[in-house]
Image (spheres, grey):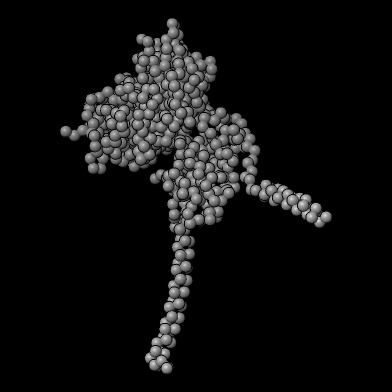
Amino acid sequence: MSKYYLSWLVPLMLTAAGAGLLTGWIYSYYALSVPMRLPGEDGRPDVSLPQTAAGATKQGHLETFDGIPSQSAGVWPTFRGIHYDAVSTESVPLMRSFPPGGPKELWRVSLGEGYAGPAVRNGRVYLIDYDIDRQADAIRCFSLEDGREIWRYSYPVPVKRNHGMSRTIPAVDDRYVVTIGPRCDVTCLDADTGQFRWAIDLVKEYGTQEPLWYAGQCPRIEDGKAILAPAGKDVLMMAVDCESGQVVWKTPNPRRWQMTHSSILPIPFEGRRMYVYCAVGGVVGIAADDGSLLWETDAWTLRIHVPTPVWLGDGRLFFSAGYNKGSMMMRLVKQQDTIVPEVLFALPPEVFGSDQQTPIYYQGFLYGVRPNKEMVCLDTDGTVRWSSGPQNKFGLGPYILADGKIIALNDDGVLSLIEARPDEFVLLARVKVLDGHESWAPPALVGGRLIVRDFTTMKCLDLRRQE
Amino acid sequence: MNPPPSELLSRRRFLKDGLWTVSLAAAGAAVAALASRSRAKEWVWQIDPYKCIGCGRCATHCVLSESAVKCVHAFEMCGYCDLCTGYFSPDPKALQTGAEHQLCPTGAIRRRFIEEPYFEFTIDESRCIGCGKCVVGCAAFGNGSLFLQIRHDRCLNCNECAIGRVCPSEAIVRVPASSPYLLKVRNP
């Protein structure tokens, strides 16, 4: 009898004990409780605050100084140079190695905090700075020769420190200089004297939504017209006559696409000039002569778009961005009277994307810095030819190309010379040229003189090869 | 046959010397043990934030069930951005606090409006699992003000750190216990 009871009592007790232990283990196991996260927990005001001072009419004033324009030839007239490709057209031989201590510093200028880069024409260096003491955008003109200031046009605008203040690069032709300020203020001045010509407040007049971290779009001047992309309530893009300030044409914005940090890319296609622009919402191609919409696509869009598209010719456009977006190659195809953008391929960010700077297309290959900070060379089919490896990182710094070399800055002002060749990464020279941080402004190169800047200082360096 | 007196003395000396030897050895061992313990306390594990790549192994390889690694925020480096890339997932649909827009899997980062256009981000350490997702996001486009540190109120200071064994960037280093944290600082 007792054996009978034991035969089922023991397993029963063991089972009960096991169940108890299991229950105890489950309930005693520590699990992190994840709270419900709902909109509105940050206390953001319901009504968005005004983007500029209410009713601000920006009365500017001009100051002149003792700087004298250089007699040196050479032009870097806008963001990414003469052909909007960041490739210098000059044949000035550049050094392949740096002398001890780095290239000779020709001059330096202290600036307000930011990332605004220079444009150069007729011996003058143009830059839109921010004067924090006066709370004003300051369009400044320096001598290319010695960096002394020639004139300065300032207009009041409140700008809070938000990853610096200044952002963009002026566009300059033989008569006018046009700028877009951080709060979307467009200003046109006489390029020689700095005399005021006209101004447009894109927020106030066109309903532009000021991008996060302020406007990064660099203006263009083509054929005497300023080409701007307000991407406001009604106007996506427009051309403004530099002489009169009159709007020559406007492209409607029925989809209410918004302004990005990307700049307009002028390209030739099928015998017609067009302007390509990446807005929040999609990409458009606009006819340069009348502003008509030639094509549009929403195949490439994101909220924070910084790099400008790259034109490869043969109808191909290369788009890249950060924020895990990667890159995409499109081809424009003419079908009877319409232009159709076709996606050729897309690359994940691990293969290629660009957070901030625009890649360079040179002799059949693309060069750029992807999100892991390494520089890479890509085939036009998206195949990585080489990467600079983890020991050669470039961060968010800018790069241009001249004399067969990529001239690259990293975040901390270290300047590298790299051979622009597809078979291997060849670092020619490297030296620290800027003391500060966030040297992100795209440089200008004129007659072998490289103008670079970090957060607060602009320098002119002599990169000419010494015979 | 009795041994000569010199041999008796020699045996006594032997015992005496032996006792001294044992005593000295014990004292030496005690000193060595104390020195060893003292040396162990002089060094602790820490993450070099400039080497860390935010791979996520700190969250999964620590011997503690909830990692000793937590996110730290250097406020002086922070940009206080509306679109904080350490807080929001890439290209978020909206800049608000809904979970679907956030990068942190446990909601350990709290966001608070200060004034246009600034937002403050603070770490709730009780929720942080040290996964490093915010660190990667912040470093990608921000100032790198979010970074990971081994918290010494939690770390067991194992002789062989389980995270250090698998850290791909060799960011786990020994630091003096007198200055146990490697904090990021604002660029000059």
Instruction: In the rendered view, tell whether residue B6 sits above or below residue A460.
Output: below
Farthest top residue in view: A336
Instruction: In the rendered view, tell whether residue B162 sits above or below residue A428.
Output: below
Taking the spot 55% from the left edge, 48% from the top edge, the residue there is B67
Which image quadrant: the C terminus of chain B? top left
Which image quadrant: the N terminus of chain B? bottom left
Q: How many marks?
A: 0
Quarter occupied by residue B129: top right
The answer, for residue A220, to whether it is visible in the render is no
**Relative side of A363 to A227, left or right:** left
Q: Could you tell me residue A354's position as x and y percent?
A: 42, 30
Q: Could you tell me residue B161's position as x and y percent?
A: 48, 52
Quarter occupied by residue A386: top left
Taking the spot 54% from the left edge, 35% from the top edge, the residue there is B88
Q: Could you tell me residue B148's position as x and y percent?
A: 49, 46
The answer, for residue B56, to whether it is visible in the render is yes
Q: Could you tell me residue A37's position as x and y percent?
A: 63, 37
Taking the spot 55% from the left edge, 53% from the top edge, the residue there is B154
Front-most of residues B142 and B50: B50
Taking the spot 54% from the left edge, 51% from the top edge, the residue there is B63
Farthest right residue in view: A1
Front-most of residues A409 and B55: B55
Front-most of residues A367 and B79: A367
Farthest left residue in view: A467
